[in-house]
Amino acid sequence: AQKITQTQPGMFVQEKEAVTLDCTYDTSDPSYGLFWYKQPSSGEMIFLIYQGSYDQQNATEGRYSLNFQKARKSANLVISASQLGDSAMYFCAMREEEYGNKLVFGAGTILRVKS
Amino acid sequence: SQTIHQWPATLVQPVGSPLSLECTVEGTSNPNLYWYRQAAGRGLQLLFYSVGIGQISSEVPQNLSASRPQDRQFILSSKKLLLSDSGFYLCALGGWGLKGLAGYEQYFGPGTRLTVT
C-alpha cells in the first residue's frame, strides 16, 4: 500500500486566492513526521513546512499552513493569498521513526496560479 | 547554514558507459546523506542513504552503487548505464541534531539531470 497519497495530479488557483493541496498517509508508527516540499521548474526541492505526529497545533509558516487531521490520516497544505511564484510541483512526505527516519514521498501535485 | 553542491548539473551519457555523480556538503559534520532519483513528472525515489563514512544502505536493487569516502562527500556510481537510469538525481542531507532542523527534514542539492542515450 502507498504510504503517501496525493490524489490531485494538477490544480489551478486564481492569484490571491487560497488553495488546499491534499495528502493522506498510511502508518502504524505512533511517532512520525509530515513534510511538504515545493519543486519549481528549476528542479530544486524547497522545504516548506513540518508537522510532528505529537504536535497539538497545526503548523504554520508564513502563507503556508498544514491542516493536520490525525484521525483521518491527512496532512493537507493550505497556501493563502496565492502568488504567481507559487506555481510549482508540491510533494508531501512522511518520516517514520520505525523505518530509520527516512522520507517517503508522494507522487506530487502540480499547482498553476492564474493571473 | 548547510550548503549542498552537486556536479555535474547536466550529463548526457551513452548506454553502457560508466557514471560518477558527486555530492559534497558544507557547514555541517556527520550528516545523514541521501541519493534520490526523480523520473520525469514523477515523485522522488530513495536510492541510497548513509549515516557515516563507509556506511551505505541501498533501498532499491539496481545497477547503481554509492560510496561515502569522506564525511561530507557522497558519490553515486554505475559501471554500465541503462536507458532506465535517465532522470534527475538529487542529493540531500538531514538528520537529528543538525542546527535548524525541527523534525528530520532533509535539505536538497541543486540536482544532476542525467540523460542516457
Image (cartoon, coloured by chain):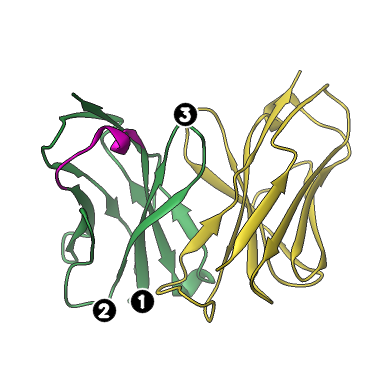
Q: Label for residue B41?
A: 3
Who's yellow, chain-wise?
A: B
Please give the name of the residue rendered at 15% of the width and 47% of the height, measured from the top-left corner: A80
**Both on one chain, marks 2 and 1?**
yes
Amino acid type assigned to the residue bearing label 2 in the image: Tyr
Residue extending farthest left: A17
Q: Is residue A55 above or below residue A14?
A: below
Q: Which residues are magenta?
A: A80-88
Q: Residue A89 versus residue A33: which sits nearer the camera?
A: A89
User: Which chain shows up in green?
Assistant: A
Q: Residues within 10 Å of mark 1 (few under 14, many from 20)?
A: some
* A23 versus B2 height, above or below: above
Q: Amino acid at mark 1?
A: Ser
Q: Chain of mark 3?
A: B
Q: In this rendering, would B107 be left or right of B12?
A: left
Q: Helix, strand or loop at disc 3? A: loop
Q: Is residue A43 left or right of residue A8?
A: right
Quadrant (top left/top right/bottom left/bottom right) for the C terminus of chain A: top left
Q: Which residue is mark 2?
A: A54
State the CA–CA distance, disc 2 to disc 1: 7 Å
Disc 2 or disc 1, which is closer to the eye?
A: 2
Residue at the farthest top position: B117
Q: Nearer the viewer, mark 1 or mark 3?
A: 3
- Which percent across, then down, holds residue A74? 21, 56
- In the rendered image, residues at marks 3 and 2 fall on the same chain: no
Circle 1 residue: A31
SS label for mark 2: loop
Q: Is residue B77 magenta?
A: no
Residues under numbered marks 1 and 3 in contact, where contact means CB atoms less than 8 Å apart: no
